[in-house]
Amino acid sequence: MIVMFVDNILVFSKHPEDVTEPLKKEFKYELKSARELEYYNGTDVLKSSEIKCEKFPAKTYIKTMYRELEKLWTVLSRIMVVL
């Protein structure tokens, strides 16, 4: 399976080089890292032991977004006091 998001490509395969090599040759695609996926687009990636699939739980993403919203709220509350 191939997944694309903007300029990121994920390859789920027993032989990922069968996919990545033609991409490198045909499109001059630069492969930055080829490894087992642990984190992608703000979420952790977990390998399921029960079935052959990847899990993309939102826990890390939610924590990150919460921290960012806290920062934003702090800045906005300071602006509101000034106004």
Image: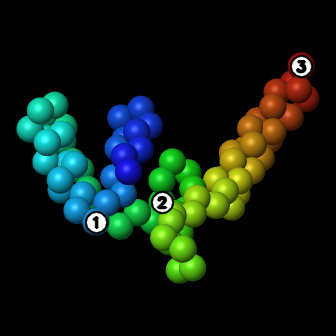
Q: Amino acid at mark 3?
A: Leu
Q: Is residue 43 visible?
A: yes
Q: Nearer the viewer, residue 71 or 30?
A: 30
Q: Residue at x 28, y 66 (%)?
A: 14
Task: Of the two numbered discs 2 and 3 on the same chain, state the one appearing first in sequence.
Answer: 2
Q: Position of residue 2 (x, y in %)?
A: 36, 46
Cα separation, mark 1 vs mark 3, equals 59 Å
Name the residue beneath numbered marker 2: 39
Q: Residue at x 17, y 53 (%)?
A: 18
Residue at disc 2, secondary structure: strand
Q: How many marks?
A: 3
| Residue occupying the far top of the picture | 83
Q: Position of residue 29 (x, y in %)?
A: 19, 37
Name the residue beneath numbered marker 3: 83
Circles 2 and 3 in contact, beta carbons < 8 Å: no
Q: Nearer the viewer, residue 51 or 10?
A: 51
Name the residue beneath numbered marker 1: 14
Cα separation, mark 2 vs mark 3, equals 41 Å
